[in-house]
Image (tube, helix red, strand yellow):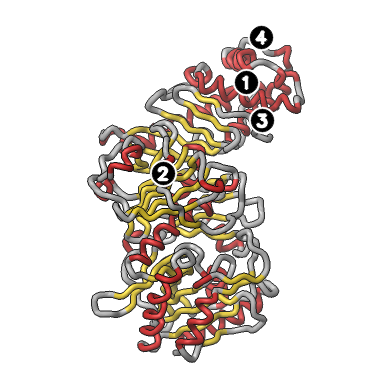
């Protein structure tokens, strides 16, 4: 059923059919039984929306009714007042109820409870939400079983009420004068997810790169406490306040599987390193930008409210862009790639960084390594899945550090075993479409931000017909390949065919190439001084997508790691 009718709102229940988002505020009204539910304004609004949609292709006379009449039929069923509803036909009513139930569940439904510094609320917020889910499923089953005349033999305990529940709270932070408009916006404090979550957005691909703007996006912000929320994230060691309009709750909640939620102690009295405003009414060119507020040393990102930006890649990549720019200004090198610690059966442990732009084959190389290793590999631990940084410690040695606690993985190129082994914890985005993605938790924040040594750094080459592993003999050749950032686009962005991106990273280094180059020089110089393996692995993903070819390359990689 298509959704194209405007948003509708009661005191406690917000529904936007165009974004498939429903927000339920338990502080305004908490439904505790089926009679309270069926008599609520929120339920009336939902019925009204459902009937408005279903009447575009009315299949039976029940769906041609007004909302009040429809609800009265449901009430009559509950109290066994058969003369009031039998004239519509039990089968037709039942068919409509099934469609209505599915219609509600097609929304991404998030419930909110404001913490009010109450330990009692915090300890019970999941039970509060569980109770609402029970009420919704009880109402559906009561009507269904009365209409069909018998009880079910199979019951499915699905997430009938909500997909997620969020505890929110107001926290006083070190707010510079020009950011006062953000002070009233509540922070997400604690988040309860009901995975696996299947979520759908109007867009399924990211376009273009983010550019600088000469005006601070905060000047355009006119959001209210009712419409906006803040996900306080720890991105690497940075503190980021990610503000989003409630119509972007799909992306806002999905962040919970990707970044650590900053606690109250990390927020109170603190100034963030980065601020993202996601869902502004208007931006220059209706595209995304960033701004460096040098006076307050805050990187500010803006993303406009439109259909394109519903794709989670915009949320993730804007967060990483402003974070990476912050890293560059701290003389750290942002790394677009994945890092794993591999424990081998011969007792060795190696840290490997796979480097490359979207679709190059970083995740696929790790998967191929797992598939061909048999019992040679005891464990592969993900340190970071998409973005990290290289930096120098106090002694001048290089270490790697991650940014995300989760992984934003493309389903198209992953084997079903990898995808579905973790399915019960995943947030799935547009799973039926090309470039379908899943967001999975990967590691703890504490471990991600530890300082990790680097044993090998390989460029994921998806465009050459060669097979295997190639070590660059000198610093010059290595830098040429890594800086060129060549790849064959696979449809994960708006690019087509062969492309080049400075340092394979359009999220920071491209925007600040002049500041990034000296850091690249220092990093490569030190790696070659320390005889660290720097090379490339041929993934074949952009050439012939041959799984056999990638596995042959993975065998060479395995041999190199175990024996040298």
Which residue is disc 3 drawn over? 99
Residue 186 in which image quadrant: top left
Q: Are marks 4 and 2 in contact (CB under 8 Å)?
A: no
Determine the CA span between mark 4 and mark 2: 49 Å
Q: Which of marks 2 and 3 is nearer the N terminus?
A: 3
| Image location (x, y in percent) of residue 394 | 24, 75
Name which of mark 4 and mark 1 comes first in the sequence: 4
Let me know if residue 424 appears in the view: no
Find disc 2 in the rendering and name its residue: 243
Within-10-Å neighbours for mark 4: few <14, some 14–19, many 20+: some
Q: What is the spatial separation of the Cα atoms under label 1 and label 2, in whole angstroms?
A: 46 Å
Question: What secondary structure is marked by label 2?
Answer: strand
Q: Nearer the viewer, mark 1 or mark 3?
A: 3
Mark drawn on residue 84:
4
Check the image and report above or below for 339 versus 263: below
In the figure, residue 358 lies in which quadrant?
bottom right
Q: Distance between the residues labelled 4 and 1?
A: 14 Å
Q: Where is residue 157 in the image (x, y as percent from the top left)?
A: 53, 38
Is the C terminus in the top left, top right, bottom left or bottom right quadrant? Answer: bottom left
Q: Which of marks 4 and 3 is nearer the N terminus?
A: 4
Q: Name the residue under label 1.
A: 146
First-in-chain label (1 vs 2): 1
Which residue is outermost to the bottom? 473
Between label 4 and label 3, give the one nearer the viewer. 3
Number of numbered discs visible in the structure rendering? 4
Q: Which of marks 4 and 2 is in front?
A: 2
């Amino acid at each position: 059923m298509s959704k194209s009718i405007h948003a509708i709102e009661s005191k406690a229940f917000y529904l936007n059919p165009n974004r498939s988002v429903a927000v339920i505020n338990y502080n305004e009204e908490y439904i505790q039984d089926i009679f309270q539910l069926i008599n609520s304004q929120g339920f009336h609004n939902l019925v009204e929306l459902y009937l408005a949609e279903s009447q575009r292709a009315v299949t039976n006379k029940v769906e041609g009714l007004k909302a009040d009449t429809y609800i009265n039929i449901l009430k009559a069923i509950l109290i066994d007042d058969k003369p009031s509803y039998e004239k519509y036909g039990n089968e037709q009513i039942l068919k409509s109820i099934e469609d209505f139930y599915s219609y509600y569940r097609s929304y991404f439904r998030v419930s909110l409870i404001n913490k009010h510094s109450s330990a009692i609320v915090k300890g019970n917020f999941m039970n509060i939400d569980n109770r609402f889910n029970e009420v919704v499923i009880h109402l559906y089953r009561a009507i269904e079983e009365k209409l069909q005349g018998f009880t079910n033999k199979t019951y499915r305990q699905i997430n009938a009420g909500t997909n997620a529940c969020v505890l929110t709270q107001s926290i006083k932070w070190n707010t510079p004068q020009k950011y006062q408009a953000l002070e009233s916006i509540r922070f997400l404090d604690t988040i309860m997810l009901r995975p696996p979550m299947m979520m759908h957005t109007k867009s399924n691909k990211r376009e273009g790169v983010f550019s600088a703007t000469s005006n601070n996006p905060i000047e355009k912000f006119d959001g209210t406490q009712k419409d906006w929320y803040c996900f306080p994230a720890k991105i690497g060691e940075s503190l980021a306040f990610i503000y989003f309009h409630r119509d972007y709750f799909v992306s806002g909640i999905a962040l919970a599987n990707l970044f650590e939620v900053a606690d109250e102690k990390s927020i109170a009295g603190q100034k963030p390193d980065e601020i993202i405003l996601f869902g502004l009414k208007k931006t220059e060119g209706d595209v995304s930008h960033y701004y460096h507020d040098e006076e307050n040393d805050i990187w500010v990102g803006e993303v406009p409210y439109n259909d394109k930006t519903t794709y989670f890649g915009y949320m993730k990549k804007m967060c990483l862009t402003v974070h990476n720019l912050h890293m560059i200004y701290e003389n750290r090198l942002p790394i677009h790639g994945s890092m794993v610690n591999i424990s081998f059966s011969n007792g060795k442990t190696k840290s490997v960084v796979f480097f490359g732009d979207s679709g190059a084959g970083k995740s696929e190389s790790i998967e191929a390594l797992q598939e061909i290793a048999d019992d040679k590999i005891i464990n592969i631990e993900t340190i970071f899945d998409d973005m990290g940084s290289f930096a120098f410690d106090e002694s001048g040695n290089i270490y790697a550090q991650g940014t995300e606690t989760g992984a934003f993985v493309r389903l198209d190129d992953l084997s079903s075993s990898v995808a579905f082994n973790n399915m019960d914890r995943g947030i799935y985005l547009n799973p039926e479409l090309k470039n379908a993605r899943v967001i999975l938790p990967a590691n703890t924040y504490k471990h991600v931000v530890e300082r990790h040594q680097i044993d090998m750094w390989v460029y994921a080459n998806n465009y050459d017909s060669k097979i295997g592993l190639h070590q660059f003999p000198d610093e010059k050749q290595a830098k040429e390949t890594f800086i060129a950032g060549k790849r064959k686009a696979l449809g994960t962005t708006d690019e087509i065919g062969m492309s080049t991106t400075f340092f394979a990273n359009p999220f920071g280094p491209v925007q600040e190439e002049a500041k990034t180059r000296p850091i690249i020089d220092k990093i490569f110089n030190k790696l070659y001084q320390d005889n660290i393996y720097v090379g490339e692995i041929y993934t074949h993903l952009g050439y012939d997508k041959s799984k056999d070819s990638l596995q042959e390359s993975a065998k060479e990689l395995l041999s190199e790691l175990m024996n040298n």
